[in-house]
Amino acid sequence: MNLNQAKILSGLIAVCGMSAAASAQSTQVLFFENFDSVPLGMNVEEGIETGAGGPMTNVWSPDFPAGWSVDFNLPGIGVLEWQGWNIADGQWWAFTCGDQNRTDFVEPSEGGLGRGAIAIADSDEWDDYDANGLDPTAQGDMNTMMTTPVIDLTGVTPGSVNLSFFSSWRDESSQTAVVEVRYDGGAWEEALRWTSDDMDPNFHDDAENEIVNISLANPAAGSMEVRFSYLNGSNNWWWAVDTIQVTGEVSGTATNAPGYSFIAADVFNETGRPIINISEAAGADDYTVLLAKDAAFTDIRQSSTASASGDYMIPGIPNGIYWVKAVANNGAGSTDSENSIRIVVDNPISVDFNGDGNLNFFDVSLFLQMFNAGCP
């Protein structure tokens, strides 16, 4: 092989290498919304006219984030806060509506998925009062739709899009839930249907706290939208939604922060090095694991990095009670885990700081690091 041939071969290898790198695919978040950015105001009728207390601050809003649209077929009819899809603080919603299993979705101590502000369509509460003295259900069934902003699909592999969301559904009578998608502004295509008829193949029984995943056969398209419809509500129950996420296979680096994740661990850990499990967050490069002495994470005692999801052994820490969460990171941003957990570290050898069962130089080194950092 002469010198020119070698140069040509080297160039081909370089070009092929660059092409392979450019074509590498990864799952990235294309859209994420948990409604927590929506400013909540005071209740107007719910809890005042229906007898569950007076006005409260930071509990409800008719406004959705920019780009969303909401339709309601009976404007001005029924309890104001529940005229179609609305945003409300989940725990206030459960409290003011008399619970009836709503806390299954919104109570963190019970494993509820809905946190902070959530989107709610609730015909049970909508029917309870009308400022015009009308019977809401006599005016017709409650039908309401909320539609996401346009979601960019540029460069997304066909057939790779997945839609997920946290859902609280309590069925009754004719109440129906429908999820539809459309691409490039075309016709709506049904992706999910739940009915309250137990003889119907689409019947969905009570599921007040679940994560819904829908694989979409997306075509090659430049954009998509998702529409959530709550239909035929007539003093029935509700459908509440939170943490809507759309992911897809793309090439190149992430342009959005990672998706949601969860952590788990034994509540009681008889070791100086507890092991937690981190569920995978779409688009994450790594995870920052934070340990704090308070549930609000204002008193952080340790920060370490897990290079991937799955089991992660926390570096040695002194005995005590801690709260733990994981923060998913990539070049576009960071996302806290949807939950935090409380752990107890109770190492029988209290000065075995690295948890290896021995007392040695490494324990002294860790002690000095923590002492210098101000840890007791």
Image: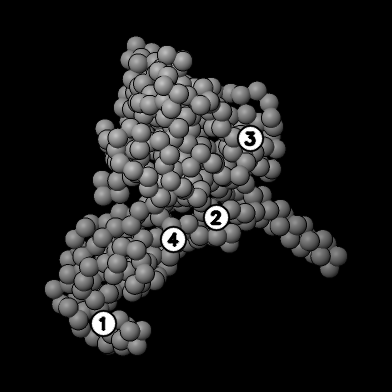
Q: Nearer the viewer, residue 356 or 114?
A: 114
Percent position of residue 188, x then y: 61, 24
Percent position of residue 342, x then y: 26, 60
Local secondary structure at mark 1: loop
The residue wearing badge 1 is: 376
Task: State left or right for residue 48 relative to residue 334.
Answer: left
The quadrant in which residue 257 appears is bottom right
Q: Tell me: residue 10, above or below residue 74.
A: below
Q: Which mark is residue 71?
A: none
Calculate the distance from the C-alpha at mark 4 to the C-alpha at mark 1: 25 Å
- N-terminal of the pair, mark 2 or mark 3, is 3
The quadrant in which residue 277 appears is bottom left
Local secondary structure at mark 4: strand
Local secondary structure at mark 2: loop
Q: Crowdedness of circle 1 by 10 Å Cα count: few (<14), some, many (20+)?
A: few
Task: State left or right for residue 334 relative to residue 69.
Answer: left
Calculate the distance from the C-alpha at mark 1 to the C-alpha at mark 3: 53 Å
Residue type, mark 1 in image: Pro
Residue type, mark 4 in image: Val
The residue wearing badge 2 is: 257
Calculate the distance from the C-alpha at mark 2 to the C-alpha at mark 4: 11 Å
Which residue is pictured at 66% across the width and 42% down the height? 152
Calculate the distance from the C-alpha at mark 2 to the C-alpha at mark 1: 35 Å
The residue wearing badge 4 is: 327
The residue wearing badge 3 is: 224
